[in-house]
Image: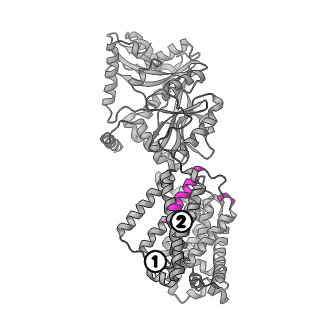
Amino acid sequence: MRENTTTRRVSAVARRIPATLALVGILILVGVAVGALWQPFTASPLFPSVAYGLPALEAGRWWTPLTGSFFVGAPWVYALVVPGLAGMALLEFRRGSRVALAYFGTGQLFSVLAAAAFLWGAALLPWAWAQEQAMALGVGPSGGIVACLAAAVGVLPSPWRLRAGTTLIAVLSVTFLYWGTLSDLQHVFAAALVLGVDRSLRPQRVSVREQRLIAFALVCTLGAMEIIGYVAPMTGPFGSSGPADGSWLDVAVNTVLVLVVALALHRGRRWAWIVLLAYSALNLVLVLLTLVLAVLVGVTELEADLDADLTSILASSTLWILAAAYFVLVRAAFRARPRAALGDAPAPGVEDVKTELRASGGGTLSWMTTWEGMSYARFGRGIVAYQRRSGVALALADPLGPVETRAATVRAFIESAEAAGLAPCFFSADDATRAAVPSDWRSIVVADDTVVDLPGLAFTGKAWGDVRTSLNRAQREGMTFRLSRLADETWGVRQQLRAISESWVDEKDLPEMGFTLGTLHEAADPEVRIALAVSPHGDVDGFLSWLPIYGDGAVRGWTLDLMRRREGGFGPVMEYLIGSSAQQFSTEGAAVMSLSGAPLAHEYPADAGAIVDLQARMASMLEPVYGFASLHRFKQKFHPRYETLSLLYRDEADLARIGAALTRAFLPHATIRQFASAGVDLVRHEQ
């Protein structure tokens, strides 16, 4: 079945990219016909007749920009050309064959002709590189491929458009400045054409995050040029030089240093910005010193002493100086203080949060924001409860405060987290919060909140048979139900509850989860109620904990948190406890009862996407350990309505950090050994 589905998907994609597949076929057929697949075509006697370049045009071979596009110079180049056509395939898939062919054809012809025209003029100057390349001939469709790659960047969603565009420019810059072959020059012209005419590639607003991304790409590009200089000769437009003296250890150390500084810049660290400015200042001193020595000693003598082309040294230093100008312009982006508190000072405390909850109300999960381990950021009247883990500002549920401040609070929290170099996200947020985040943010449904409306609730009819049966059986067997506070119970009852909880935890290889799943410690809050099922012998056979839901200055409902039962006790104890609690809450005038949401238990449509497929896979793996899906099915006995709870995040690049943050938020006390043990159990269940 899976093979048939895969085959159908491949066939459907192939039908939408006929032009790309046809081009691949032509290139391979031509390669077979002239032997370019197994020997260099540049050595073929046919090469001068079909190759493009300034000499071909000057000789009157006007057809070469067309014919040269379908030949490949060497067998190894096919390994770059064929995968490179993925950009054309994506463009054709998204915008159609005509658009893809137009970009490919226009980009290929423009890059060949523009490079020839540029070299014709540049060769008149005393520029050795230009004079050398003006005599070169070339073949291959790389100009059209780069044009399609640049155009394909425009069909990507934000912010991947900026990331892919920045990466493309960085790669083309390094290859051109360092090697500077005829093909490299054509690639620059092809990309410049598309970047100049395609409006979708122009960023509308350069955010702090995007400024850091550009700085990251700049440092990686310049660092790559420095590192390549250790292992390969430079032959680009700024002159030539031999490999720098140094060992592979030097290369490794420099690579690590560049990556450390670049990653720190990406996170907005001030120290990395200072280091780069200092390094750029040294390059400025080097440029000035080199110019002075060139005047005093002479260029030829200085180059002999340095054993390098003077222009290559000046070019590298000048690029760092130009990069420093950008760093100065965006200096405000590098003031991240990762340990600084977010929001307005002073930061609110847990009592402030409870006061705000009582005054303006909250959602079914809002009381969880009062638990230990939470930090709070105030923005005017709005408050966001969050945890700072793995470089993520992990906000729990929805912002607190008046409804009209929701959107402003969400935006302020995002800006504050990004300024601190943290990745902001909201976990278990409702639809109102999802509407308040930026339009280009992503969302994944992480759970369905199961809400039971209490007014007029009656367990009548066939649908309520299981609940009604448990209530009747409990009455026959002498079970007693009571709602209480943990502090009001006797020492003996509290010990029973502790023993039941410890027995439940002992069955798991991982400790009790946190974040949105409480323990007896959270149940000890005076505003949390405990539902007890007591046997005729005085034994507690099961218990629940209920968190208050505030609205309009009073408690309007209750949210289920803990569910624990004694081994060997009353069978349908959970149905009995929840049903009895619902009856009691309804009598008291409560409006809603939330059975909370089971993580990873949302039912998605068949075509929901790859991320959801991964989430479903995780749910099936974790089911033997935590039983999320079975818990979700159990709650369906109470016929709730569902309200989706979502994970809101900037884009897929943050998911790895968010995954690590959620793991530590839910399992803050788990050890590596416990993770490993749970992993073994997961593998066993999978088998």
Give the residue drawn at x 34%, y 14%: 493
Q: Is 375 above or below relative to 474? A: below
Q: Is 247 above or below relative to 630? A: below
Give the residue drawn at x 53%, y 71%: 287
Q: Is 127 above or below relative to 423? A: below
- Label 1: element kind: loop
Give the residue drawn at x 49%, y 29%: 369
Q: What x and y, as percent, mark residue 182?
A: 57, 78
**Image position of 599 (left or right of 112):** left
Residue type indicated by callout 2: Trp
Mark 1 = which residue? 233
Q: What x and y, as percent, mark residue 56?
A: 63, 86
Residue type indicated by callout 1: Pro
Disc number for residue 320: 2
Q: What x and y, as percent, mark residue 588?
A: 54, 12
Q: What x and y, as percent, mark residue 444?
A: 54, 41
Visible in this render: residue 178?
Answer: no
503 inside magenta stretch: no
Give the residue drawn at x 67%, y 85%: 62
The magenta region covers: 199-222
**Image position of 388 (left or right of 107):** left
